């Protein structure tokens, strides 16, 4: 069953009216083509108005749409020879993170990404996209393989965060993420990180140290989910829309702040409306970025990655005594 978001109600209503008129025309033979054309024009205008003025919270809702393409959806469209590798060689295989070698536009790459499920059974299998320590250790094992083979790494990020359960803490989730951060800075191959849906907290950054950070138009990237932020600041998750606005988590804001390098456009209304087109658009940008990065040496890639992240959060200081501004 198609899922429609609350703010899409006017679009849904117009589509129903168009469908009713089309059924009436086919069943009775009455010509209502002019009425249908008028409604289709209004539908186009309404969709343009709604989707061009989405609030941060509405974009978060789109990023979580159950029909939105996940990592495997992009892999099957962009890298059909993908071969999944499993296990962290320490504890187990985390199904919330998948990865393995593949060929992308004739170039060997290592693909790693978080994976959600479509239904309850698959979501339980994937732990609802919440990676555990062994997932990050598996990802690091694959990144080291890619570094040894000197092939680029592409990570797909779509997670509300790392799994915060007792078992995860017992197996040192924070340490696993921290080691990934350290080791990703030392890689001598191109690393491209793509936020395709949710980019939540340390769960996202554990796969997010790259030479390029790409973000899809309706994805988000944040230190915490809006609900988590609302629960901390206002003691009530109902303030999630307010938190989403304060967190500056949209693609446009992240580009403005220098966190994201490129915003990848999506089909109108979100990637879930046309998965094939969404994959095509992403594939074009990945190809462009790889062509640029693969011209750099290993040391240049390391240095660029380091400088990129060192520049995050930089600000200018002024001496209030010299400037005449009161402290």
Image (cartoon, rainbow, N blue to C red):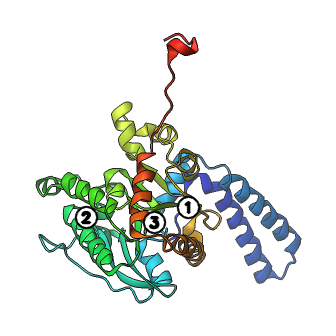
Q: CA distance from mark 2 to mark 1?
A: 34 Å
Q: Which type of secondary structure does the marked residue at label 1 adopt? A: loop
Q: Quadrant of residue 100?
A: bottom left
Q: How many marks?
A: 3
Residue depicted at 35% across the width and 50% down the height: 201
189 vs 48, nearest the viewer: 189
Q: Residue 4's mark? A: 1
Residue drawn at the location 33% of the way across and 59% of the way down: 185
Q: Are marks 2 and 1 in contact (CB under 8 Å)?
A: no
Q: Answer whether labels 3 and 2 touch (C-beta < 8 Å).
A: no
Left or right side of 203 for 272: right
Of the two numbered discs 1 and 3 in the rendering, the one whose residue sits closer to the viewer: 3
Q: Using the image as rendered, state which of residue 67 and residue 20 is in the foreground.
A: 67
Crowd band around label 2 with a 10 angstrom C-alpha radius: few (<14), some (14–19), many (20+): many
Q: Which residue is mark 3?
A: 66
Q: Quadrant of residue 297?
A: bottom left
- Residue 43 point in image, percent of width and height: 75, 62
> Does the image show residue 235?
no
Give the mark nearer the N terminus: 1 vs 3: 1
Residue identified by numbered label 2: 136
Residue 225 drawn above or below residue 118: above
Precedes in sequence: disc 3 or disc 2: 3
From this viewpoint, is residue 96 visible?
A: yes
Disc 2 on helix, strand or loop?
A: helix
x then y, percent, for residue 5: 55, 57
Q: Residues within 10 Å of mark 3 (few under 14, many from 20)?
A: some
Residue 240 marker = none
* Badge 3 element: loop
Q: Based on the displayed image, in which of its 4 quarters is residue 148 positioned?
A: bottom left
């Amino acid at each position: 069953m198609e899922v429609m978001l609350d703010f899409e109600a006017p679009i849904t209503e117009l589509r129903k009216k168009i469908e009713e008129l089309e059924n009436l025309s086919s069943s009775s033979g009455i010509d209502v083509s002019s009425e249908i054309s008028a409604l289709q024009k209004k539908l186009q205008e309404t969709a343009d108005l709604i989707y061009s003025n989405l609030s941060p919270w509405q974009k978060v809702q789109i990023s979580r749409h159950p029909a939105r393409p996940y990592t495997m959806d992009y892999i099957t469209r962009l890298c059909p020879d993908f071969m999944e590798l499993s296990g962290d060689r320490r504890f187990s295989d985390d199904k919330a993170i998948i990865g393995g070698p593949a060929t992308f536009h004739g170039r060997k790459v290592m693909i790693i990404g978080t994976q959600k499920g479509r239904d309850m059974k698959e979501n339980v299998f994937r732990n609802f996209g919440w990676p555990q320590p062994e997932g990050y250790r598996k990802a690091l094992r694959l990144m080291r393989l890619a570094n040894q083979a000197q092939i680029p790494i592409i990570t797909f990020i779509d997670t509300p965060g790392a799994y915060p359960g007792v078992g995860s803490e017992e197996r040192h989730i924070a340490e696993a993420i921290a080691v990934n951060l350290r080791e990703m800075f030392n890689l001598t191959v191109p690393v491209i990180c793509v936020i395709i849906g949710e980019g939540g907290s340390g769960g996202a950054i554990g796969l997010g140290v790259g030479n390029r950070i790409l973000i899809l138009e309706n994805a988000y990237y944040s230190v915490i989910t809006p609900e988590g932020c609302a629960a901390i600041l206002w003691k009530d998750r109902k303030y999630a829309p307010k938190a989403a606005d304060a967190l500056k988590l949209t693609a446009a804001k992240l580009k403005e702040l220098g966190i994201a390098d490129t915003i990848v456009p999506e089909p109108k209304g979100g990637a879930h409306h046309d998965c094939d087109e969404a994959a095509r658009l992403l594939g074009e940008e990945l190809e462009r970025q790889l062509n640029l990065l693969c011209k750099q040496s290993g040391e240049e890639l390391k240095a660029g990655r380091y400088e990129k992240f060192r520049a995050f959060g930089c600000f200018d200081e002024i001496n209030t005594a010299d400037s005449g501004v009161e402290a």
